[in-house]
Image (tube, rainbow, N blue to C red):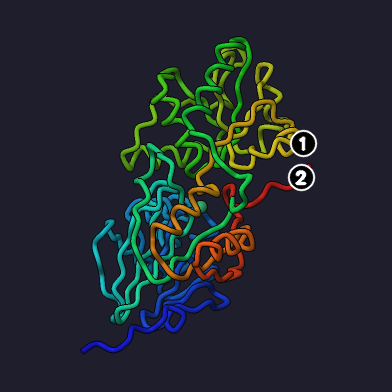
């Protein structure tokens, strides 16, 4: 008869390099180069260069290789399809979709009857460019807490896209420039604009071109894309331009035709923040779970204990305790350096 299963804290430890699965001998989203890494998704605060062996989804490996260059995204790479288990030094490992960006995965592990799931970054709302989040029951669930305050409730993204298109219809002689991060948010916006019936070319800041190409190579159809930098001012009247958040309030955007400055981010829920950034059209579109999604997920995974990696851990841990779930702050360093996980600096 099997003995009592160990607690995940006995085999999953926080180290200076990040979370280590001790019996498996691998790190999850390590912050420095390691021998064996399992990577949840391609954002640079989770996927770093220089590991010897990298296990991830095929799409995450392709994104890492495109961003880091051949050889820097793991000397050896192992692509693991969703749901297929592998055994690493006696630890069963499998991936489930996290719904965050293309290729994003939750890392599920089982050792001696004890199961932990590291969700990476995730969201529960639909995204035409990312496989939807799947619930995996576990003993310990590791969650982010970027938007873990009751004020953060993301409206349906479709409604925000509709607001953007209404504004474009209202100001046909102006250019709408939308600030968004280049991995994930940019392609999600394009795909949602296409779903909403926008079939005209979409213009891109140069920083967004390469990853859109990678998405297309991986089978995500984005329609006709053009580079905004070479376009004439008149061509950009009535057009939608996607650019990095830092570029929209910058000199770069001033060359556009009377730009309407928009930013697509969960932080746009805070009106003051949008005003400070000179954002005329704040769009609350996030690739991270909002307050309700975080709490719903916490209940669905049926884990008696939840570990919180980064964000507003205090509020989440308090809310979990009211639901009889034990919370623990991991204080992982180096998270939130890319994408909206980092609260934008006040300007
Ligand atoms: Zn991310």
Disc 1: CA contacts within 10 A as few (<14), some (14-19) or many (>=20) = few
Viewer-side residue, 83 vs 29: 83
Q: Is mark 2 within 8 Å of ligand 1?
A: no
Do labels 1 and 2 touch, CB within 8 Å? Answer: yes
Horizontal relation, residue 35 to residue 180: left or right: left
Check disc 2 and report the residue beneath it: 346
Residue 290: percent from the left, percent from the top? 54, 47
Q: Quadrant of residue 40?
A: bottom left
Q: Name above or below for residue 170 compared with residue 39.
A: above
Q: Which residue is painted at 36% across and 46% down in the image?
A: 132
Check disc 1 and report the residue beneath it: 276
Residue 142: percent from the left, percent from the top? 47, 65
Horizontal relation, residue 36 to residue 169: left or right: left
Q: Which residue is painted at 45% across and 48% down in the image?
A: 100
Quick one: quadrant of the C terminus? top right
Viewer-side residue, 124 vs 77: 124
The mark found on residue 59 in the picture is: none
Q: Name above or below for residue 170 compared with residue 342.
A: above
Horizontal relation, residue 258 to residue 11: left or right: right
Disc 2: CA contacts within 10 A as few (<14), some (14-19) or many (>=20) = few
Q: Quadrant of residue 219?
A: top left
Residue 327: percent from the left, percent from the top? 54, 69
Viewer-side residue, 132 vs 56: 132
């Amino acid at each position: 008869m099997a003995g009592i299963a160990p607690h995940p804290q006995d085999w999953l430890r926080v180290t200076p390099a990040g979370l280590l699965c001790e019996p498996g001998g691998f790190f999850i989203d390590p912050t420095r180069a390691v021998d064996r890494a399992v990577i949840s998704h391609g954002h640079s605060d989770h996927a770093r260069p220089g590991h010897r062996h990298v296990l991830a989804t095929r799409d995450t490996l392709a994104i890492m290789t495109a961003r880091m260059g051949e050889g820097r995204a793991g000397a050896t790479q192992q692509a693991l399809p969703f749901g297929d288990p592998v055994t690493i030094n006696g630890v069963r490992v499998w991936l489930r979709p996290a719904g965050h960006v293309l290729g994003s995965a939750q890392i599920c592990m089982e050792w001696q009857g004890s199961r932990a799931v590291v969700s990476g970054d995730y969201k529960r709302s639909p995204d035409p460019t990312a496989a939807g989040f799947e619930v995996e029951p576990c003993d310990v669930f590791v969650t982010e807490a970027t938007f873990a305050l009751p004020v953060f409730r993301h409206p349906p993204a479709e409604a925000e896209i509709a607001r953007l298109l209404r504004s474009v219809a209202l100001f046909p002689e102006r250019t709408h420039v939308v600030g968004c991060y280049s991995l994930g948010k940019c392609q999600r916006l394009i795909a949602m604009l296409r779903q909403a019936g926008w079939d005209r070319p979409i213009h891109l800041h140069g920083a967004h071109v390469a990853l859109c190409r990678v998405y297309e190579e991986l089978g995500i159809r984005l329609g006709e894309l053009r580079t905004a930098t070479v376009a004439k001012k008149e061509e950009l009247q009535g057009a939608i331009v996607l650019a990095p958040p830092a570029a929209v309030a910058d000199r770069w955007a001033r060359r556009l035709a009377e730009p309407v400055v928009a930013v697509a981010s969960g932080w746009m829920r805070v009106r003051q923040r949008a005003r400070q950034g000179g954002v005329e059209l704040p769009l609350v579109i996030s690739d991270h779970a909002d307050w309700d999604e975080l709490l719903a997920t916490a209940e669905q995974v049926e884990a008696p204990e939840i570990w919180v990696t980064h964000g507003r851990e205090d509020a989440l841990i308090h809310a979990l305790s009211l639901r009889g779930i034990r919370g623990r702050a991991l204080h992982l360093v180096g998270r939130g350096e890319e994408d909206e996980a980092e609260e934008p600096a006040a300007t």
